[in-house]
Image: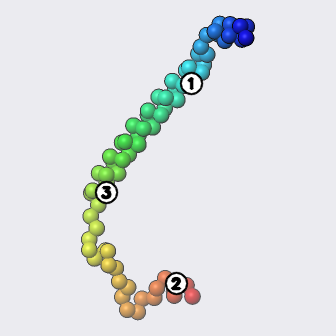
């Protein structure tokens, strides 16, 4: 048991692993910032859209076939 502990204690940090963890943390932070930016842009775009009442209640004029009828 003492040899196992000595071997474990004697090892220094793995710098490649430490660098990879730091890189991944930075990437996560960058992606979180991008999500915030995109949400703000989405809110701005959604607030700029105006839907008129006539678009909400579209009707098909008489004599114009429905799309499914035109294909038959």
Which of disc 3 and disc 1 is earlier in sequence? 1
Residue 66 percent location from the top left of the image: 46, 85
Of circles 2 and 1, which is in front? Answer: 1
If you read the primary sequence from the N terminus, does the residue marked by circle 2 or circle 1 appear first?
1
Q: Is residue 39 visible?
A: yes
Mark pair 2, 1: CA separation: 56 Å
Identify the secondary structure beneath mark 2: helix
Report the residue marked by disc 2: 68
> Disc 2 or disc 3, which is closer to the eye?
3
**Which residue does the image show at 51% across and 87% down from the upper left?**
69
Q: Position of residue 12 (x, y in %)?
A: 61, 10
Tell me which residue sits at (61%, 16%) in the image: 14
Does residue 60 sit above or below 8 in this rendering? below
Q: In which quarter of the image is residue 54?
A: bottom left
Mark 1–mark 3 CB contact (< 8 Å)? no
Residue 46: which numbered mark, if any?
3
Residue pointed to by mark 1: 20
Please state which of residues 13 and 2 is positioned toward the viewer in this rendering: 2
Q: Is residue 1 left or right of residue 17?
A: right
Label 3 Cα crowd, 10 Å radius (few <14 / some 14-19 / many 20+): few
In the image, 19: left or right of 6? left
Residue 64 sits above or below residue 33 on the image:
below
Closest to the observer: 45 or 43? 43
Residue 4, which numbered label?
none
Q: Is mark 3 on a helix, strand or loop?
A: helix
At numbered mark 1, what does the secondary structure look like: helix, strand or loop?
helix
Q: How far apart are marks 1 and 3 (CA)?
A: 38 Å
Quadrant of residue 45 within the rendered picture? bottom left
């Amino acid at each position: 048991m003492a040899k196992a502990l000595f071997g474990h204690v004697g090892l220094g940090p793995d710098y490649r692993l430490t660098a990879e963890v730091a890189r991944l943390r930075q990437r996560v932070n960058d992606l979180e910032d991008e999500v915030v930016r995109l949400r703000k842009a989405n809110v701005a775009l959604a607030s700029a859209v105006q839907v008129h009442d006539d678009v909400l209640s579209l009707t098909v004029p008489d004599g114009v076939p429905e799309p499914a009828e035109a294909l038959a």
